[in-house]
Image: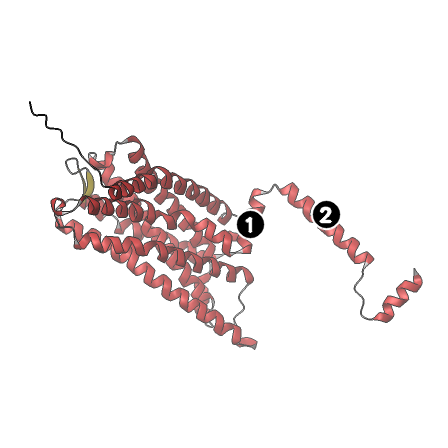
Amino acid sequence: MDNNISTTTIDPAVAILTAARIGIQHIGQPILFTLGMIGCISNIAIFLRPSMRINSCAIYFHASSWANLFCLTWGLFISMLASFTNNNPLTYNSAYCKIRYYILTGSQLASRACVVLACLDRFLLCSQSAQQRLFCRPSVAIKVMLLTIVGCACLSIYVLIVYDAFPQQRQCSPSSAVGRIIDTTVLFLFNFGTPALLMSTLSGMIIWRLKQNAKRIGRQKVHVRKRDLQLSTMLIGQVILYITTALPFVSNFVYLTITQYVPSSSKSSYRIAAESLAITATGSFGTFIFNALTFYVYTLTAPSFRRELFALVVPRRWMNHSQATEQFQLSQTNRIHPFLRNAKSINSQVERN
């Protein structure tokens, strides 16, 4: 009697890629989500402080923090739930599919737009034209921010029309070729391409204007406060973070667009595993790095932001006690070692004592 025994061997390379993808979903995403929520809530609390509410650039940062919070909630958190529960309502609930991607798309657009507006704000602040510097007022920033949010919400309406759930394919995506073209155009132009171009261009011009302003003398020099300079540093750090994290996603997006008509049956198991890992690493994880880590960029680049964070975390009575102690020590130091103009006055005080 013949016994037919079939054995299935798994390629070690494929197993490593699969394990890496699962590790990103089960370990990387929760860590990023936790750091991001702490950072966004801290940003919102700091930018609500009186010293920050009067600065136009900080207003744009505040709005961007809310948009990042929505991105992490409706993007990363929902992706985590689907991964941990093995149940993704996006694939069979059409209304949930449309609402989720509408909010996520609008939030991502608003987050990028606020950073672009902050770049424009810092660029105009360094201008010699008083008319251009009028743009850098808090009242103007609030109006422009509200118009931008409304514009992003209107631009994202196409998602409610073209997106739909497909239970058989287990995905939530545009339902027609025209919908895919619209989605690709909005994603590439307004979510990545145009913001990256504007951010990098305006950041370079901000640095150039600050250098030119440092060379000016007299009335030609534009007075820029130290806090405004530090906000410019925070902004440039945020732009670098955005471009660094957006490039991998754009590269993988272009690859998937080119190879979208290649049938899965013609792909090797290694290629399928590698593509799945790239989609997870650059999509459901990589695109949210910018939303999650802005707080830590601010903390590392700006001493004024760290002082506001310290004032937010440390109780007021401790700060008052610390300031009183410093003032007392300073008064004692000045009493023992006064600042005197010359050696003659020092000798006279020694003789008196």
Identified by mark 2, the residue type is: Thr
Residue drawn where x is 33% and y is 59% of the image: 195
Q: Left or right of 227: which side holds 22?
A: left
Colour scheme of the rendered structure: secondary structure
The image shows residue 6 at horizontal and vertical percentages of: 14, 31
Determine the secondary structure under disc 2.
helix
The image shows residue 159 at horizontal and vertical percentages of: 22, 46
Quadrant position of the C terminus in the picture: bottom right
Near-viewer residue (353 or 132): 353
Task: Give neighbour class at mark 2: few <14, some 14-19, many 20+ (Cα, 10 Å).
Answer: few
- Can see residue 54? no
Identified by mark 1, the residue type is: Glu
Near-viewer residue (114 or 146): 114
Residue that protrudes farthest toward the top in the picture: 1
Q: Which mark is residue 325?
A: 2
The image shows residue 105 at horizontal and vertical percentages of: 29, 47
Task: Give neighbour class at mark 1: few <14, some 14-19, many 20+ (Cα, 10 Å).
Answer: some
Between marks 1 and 2, how big is the CA–CA gap? 20 Å
Against 258, residue 176 (above or below) is above
The answer to whether marks 1 and 2 mark residues whose Cβ atoms lie closer than 8 Å is no
